[in-house]
């Protein structure tokens, strides 16, 4: 089942010419369209399904600096500043609250990891502190676990996945951007080796700048034009409860299960790091680059083969621009949830919090997290194709980073001073092998 998403209106008529076409109406694309439109550039935001319909509405909703990879941390910090102001600036609530994030554990290896991260936090001035066993217990009233400690980030928080991308897209539309839903981008129009337009199912939009923010579909789109973007997808499962007893104001991570309080009084609940890595043609193509990451997470991943081998963003696909493309065949990527995982998630939640014994599940859905080999996104121009930019591969971190990532992409496209140093996110790092951090980050 797809999670509920705030639906927004579309523009019916495609423009003949714009300054920038943004492909993909998730939070990254919507944010980029918003910040580009604020600079008085003409923008078309093109989405094959509906705004926020895929991973941007299927995540936990966490907006955090805590436990970020050092390469992402400057982006995360600027992102929190943007989250603070965007609701008031646009005039609509994105559900953002600095409600704090609590991590509690029974595992010594977690404590060691968080202690190591404090060195990074001190370098960047992040507000975080370790919790003793007693403090962790005090911050999780009603929990049944005997924690050995934890970590707390009081200035981190969460936003509402069902609202954020649509509200940002509405903000862009208010600034004059054209929002085209049910309008797949089939490919690029290229003249003399440079981008000159985007070929959509509804016609050609002429432009000299294109941002591909297509999430899990980005690699397939790029590959159609000879651009290699290594991506691997992991299918995960998440559930949403009906309104229930408050057990945490914001977000709570534990090794067993994680909770996020939603605006409606229910919780999004999931098991961190658990998912299914499905064998796909794209996965096999890029497997050598992902082996270090897979080895690091092998205990948390299940391996399998399913429909994704034959259809979806990682299947073999060939299409011409005057025919129906794979993007039209699957308007919204809605992977089936793992029923066993959903039952396990709920059982763990009830065991940890007896007060949830009678909680009712409102929805269960599958999610598709697209990763890069170093678990760090690409936000970059593609040097081999002038006018083509990519913002994808956010590796499960895209929602919280979304506003800042969109801002950075807009900076690069417009030639303005980048919000943060863009070098850690450059496309060319996979070929020049420089600045690649440890597999999977921290």
Image (spheres, rainbow, N blue to C red):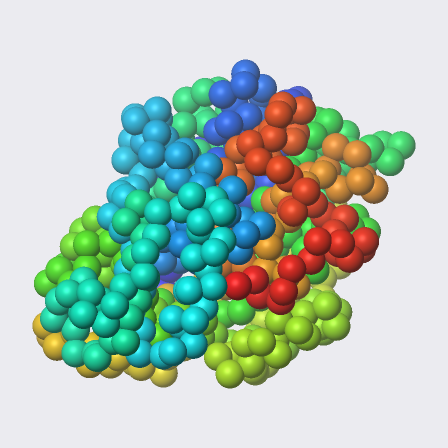
In the image, 181 versus 19, the foreground residue is 19
Give the residue displayed 46% in from the left and 60% down from the top: 117
Q: Is residue 315 above or below residue 57?
A: below
Image position, residue 147 (x, y; %): 25, 76
Number of numbered callouts drawn: 0
Give the residue displayed 58% in from the left and 19% down from the top: 41
Image position, residue 63 (x, y; %): 38, 48
Q: Does the image show residue 100?
A: yes
Give the residue displayed 32% in from the left and 61% down from the top: 130
Task: Looking at this view, name the residue that lies furthest to the right.
Answer: 192
**Which of the 4 image quarters holds residue 152?**
bottom left
Q: Is residue 20 above or below residue 232?
A: above
Image position, residue 188 (x, y; %): 74, 40
Q: Does the image show residue 26?
A: no
Image position, residue 386 (x, y; %): 79, 34
- Residue 14 appears left or right of 250: right
- Residue 262 appears left or right of 90: left
In the image, 154 versus 5, the foreground residue is 154
On-image quarter of the N terminus: bottom left
In the image, 177 versus 429, the foreground residue is 429
**Which of the 4 image quarters holds residue 199?**
top right
In the image, 330 versus 72, the foreground residue is 72
Give the residue displayed 49% in from the left and 70% down from the top: 235
- Residue 408 appears left or right of 322: left
């Amino acid at each position: 089942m797809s999670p509920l998403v705030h639906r927004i209106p579309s523009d019916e008529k495609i423009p003949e010419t714009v300054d920038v076409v943004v492909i993909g109406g998730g939070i990254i694309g919507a944010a980029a369209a918003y910040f580009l439109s604020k600079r008085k550039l003409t923008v078309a935001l093109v989405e094959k399904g509906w705004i926020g319909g895929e991973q941007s509405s299927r995540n936990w909703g966490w907006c955090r600096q805590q436990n970020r990879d050092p390469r992402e941390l400057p982006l995360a910090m600027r992102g929190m500043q943007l989250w603070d102001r965007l609701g008031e600036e646009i005039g609509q609530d994105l559900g953002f609250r600095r409600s704090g994030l609590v991590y509690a554990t029974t595992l010594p290896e977690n404590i060691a990891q968080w202690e190591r991260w404090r060195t990074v936090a001190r370098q960047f001035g992040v507000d975080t502190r370790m919790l003793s066993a007693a403090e962790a217990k005090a911050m999780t009233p009603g929990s049944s676990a005997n924690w050995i400690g934890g970590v707390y980030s009081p200035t981190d928080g969460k936003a509402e996945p069902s609202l954020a991308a649509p509200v940002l897209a509405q903000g862009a539309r208010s600034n004059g951007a054209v929002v085209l839903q049910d309008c797949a981008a089939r490919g690029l129009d290229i003249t003399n080796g440079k981008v000159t337009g985007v070929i959509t199912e509804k016609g050609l939009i002429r432009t000299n700048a294109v941002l591909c923010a297509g999430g899990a579909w980005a690699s397939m789109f790029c590959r159609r034009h000879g651009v290699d973007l290594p991506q691997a997808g992991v299918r995960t499962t998440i559930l949403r409860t009906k309104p229930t007893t408050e057990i945490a104001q914001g977000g709570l991570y534990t090794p067993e299960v994680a909770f996020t309080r939603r605006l409606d009084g229910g919780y999004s609940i999931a098991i961190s790091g658990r998912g299914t890595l499905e064998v796909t043609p794209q996965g096999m193509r890029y497997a050598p680059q992902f082996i270090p990451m897979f080895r690091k997470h092998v205990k948390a991943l299940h391996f399998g083969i399913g429909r994704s081998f034959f259809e979806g963003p990682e299947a073999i696909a060939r299409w011409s621009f005057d025919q129906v493309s794979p993007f039209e065949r699957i308007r919204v990527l809605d992977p089936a949830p793992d029923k066993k995982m959903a039952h396990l998630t709920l059982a763990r939640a009830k065991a940890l919090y007896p007060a949830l014994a009678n909680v009712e599940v409102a929805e269960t859905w599958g999610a598709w997290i697209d990763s890069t080999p170093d678990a760090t996104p690409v936000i970059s121009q593609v040097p081999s194709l002038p006018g083509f930019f990519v913002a994808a591969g956010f590796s499960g971190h895209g929602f919280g980073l979304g506003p800042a990532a969109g801002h950075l992409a807009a900076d690069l496209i417009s030639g303005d001073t980048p919000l943060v140093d863009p070098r850690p996110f450059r496309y060319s790092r996979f070929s020049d092998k420089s600045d690649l951090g440890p597999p999977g980050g921290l």
